[in-house]
Image: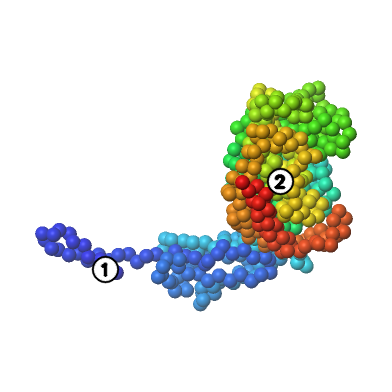
Amino acid sequence: MLRLFVIAPASAVLVACAEPAPECAPTAGGPIAVVEGTAVTATLGCATEGEARPPEAWQITGLPDGATFDPATATIAWVPRLDQAAVYTVELAVADEATTGSLRIAVADAFDAPGNVPPLDPVRYPDELGVPVIFVTPRPTSEDYAPVTVVFGGRVYAAEAKLRGASSLSYPKQSYTLKFPAGAYFHAPELGTGFPARKRIVLTSTFDDNSYLRQRLAYELWNRMDPGHVQIAAASAVVYLDGEFHGLYALTDHVDKHRFAAAGLAETGDVYKSINHDANFDLRQYDGDPKLTLHDGYTKKDGLPEEGQPGAFNAIDDLVDFVARRDDATFAAEVATRIHVPDFRDWYVFATYVLGSDSGGKNAYLYHDPAGGPWRYAPWDWNHSFGQAWETSRTGSDDWDGFTNKNRLFVRLLADPALGPTVAARYRELLAGPLGEGEVVALYDRLVAETAAVAARDWRAWRDAYRGFERWSDRRDLTEHPDEVAYVRTWLSERVAYLRARFAP
């Protein structure tokens, strides 16, 4: 191409300059993600518009063992063997040109193929069909911490791990807590909603949820409801135990003093967890018997004095006593100084929205700063949600649970003449925003698309165990994975419509 430049108008001298030909930006498409045994083909070309190069100009390095390059067609071809699960990067270049490119080929482990060899190098296996992978060796077998090696994102951690949960301890696919040492915290700020420098993380089993998304969807919606909430980071991850595929998990924050400190609260605060329905802010247990202590149903996770020492439960005893015994006038005058009302109001809204009847009175973390300030709330455990109960039975999109027999604090908030009306107003605000049908279904569909390929693999691995599990083996409405995904999507849409009508002005 020639371009004319006027040097000086007076001289009218024209100089012709040749413009350098644009260089080729090498590409072979991609990234490519396949399972071992699946054919890979990729044809090289220029991403630069209008450019092309003859086959002999291509320079390729890093071809995996067994892969070939046909110079006549500029095509890479490969069928990965059953011992080649890893991520490969093929470098692309053009002779005598400076620009380069690369092709990423991620080969997933064919875990259920006869003769399969699990991934040989976990460091080179950071993701599986687009979902991050975490390796834990050896497999945790105790509720006490024991040393493990964790590999994630190409990094090797010397960590500790233990079993966690209550009902999930009986699952063949169990849940785990991983604890990392100071100076080597789990660090994945790009993962899900972000995990920068975490001392502990939780791998929550999806064995009781063949949509694979209830826990993660719940936390992401809670975070979106209000940036002032104590945020619970959540993502999906593939877990390998002792080097072998163990399935798709919800990877989430561990709620403790560090999580509350990340929300700007003192790390020295008391953290209590409600572990059963006796944690009902009342003077009687859930079954109606008198309580032995006001803190029945709670365990203490952090803060001084520690559980087992005198005074460890003084703070939660005082809160329960306030809710259960104060008259209406005193409750109205003091409640906003005792609790951070937006937290507890949103707890009620969210638990009723998702129909999380197992988390409307328990599965909560409550934080108290002895130096002063209102109580704060953080959510936990949402397998009972979005159309199923904790043992997977169905719950209707037009069912309602107001927790009147599970949480006296909610009862009192709703009965308060000033605070009660704000609950309906908050509902309407959220249904017009982050809890509206459009936003929620769009988020759900994005999570489905992200996890679908691995969820199908997990379903192959655990389908028979799930369908035969004693706790729900008498169900006659068990679904296949794709059907459960569709069921949740329909439930979400119908739920929003039901709540809009219920809380219409």
Q: Decide which of 63, 348 is in the foreground and name it.
A: 348
Image quadrant containing the N terminus:
bottom left
Element on which disc 1 rests: strand
**Which quadrant of the structure image shows residue 11?**
bottom left
**Which quadrant of the structure image shows residue 467?**
bottom right
Element on which disc 2 rests: helix
Mark 2 or mark 1, earlier in chain: 1
Residue drawn at point x = 84 percent, y = 59 percent: 475
What number is the disc on residue 352? 2
Q: Position of residue 207 (x, y in %)?
A: 78, 54
Within 10 Å of disc 2 (Cα), the crowding (few <14, some 14-19, many 20+) is many
Q: Amino acid at mark 1?
A: Leu
Q: Which residue is mark 1?
A: 2
Q: Decide which of 215, 9 is in the foreground and name it.
A: 215
Q: Nearer the viewer, mark 2 or mark 1?
A: 2
Q: Is residue 475 visible?
A: yes
Within 10 Å of disc 1 (Cα), the crowding (few <14, some 14-19, many 20+) is few
Residue drawn at point x = 64 percent, y = 42 percent: 424
28 vs 353: above or below: below
**Which quadrant of the structure image shows residue 79?**
bottom right
The answer to whether the residues at label 2 and label 1 have Cβ atoms under 8 Å apart is: no
293 vs 183: above or below: above
What number is the disc on residue 317? none
Residue drawn at point x = 85 percent, y = 56 percent: 472
Q: Marks 2 and 1, how far apart in space?
A: 71 Å
Q: Amino acid at mark 2?
A: Thr
Q: Position of residue 35 (x, y in %)?
A: 67, 65
Q: Position of residue 276 (x, y in %)?
A: 81, 39
Q: Please tell me how many numbered marks the rendered image carries.
A: 2
Residue drawn at point x = 54 percent, y = 73 percent: 75
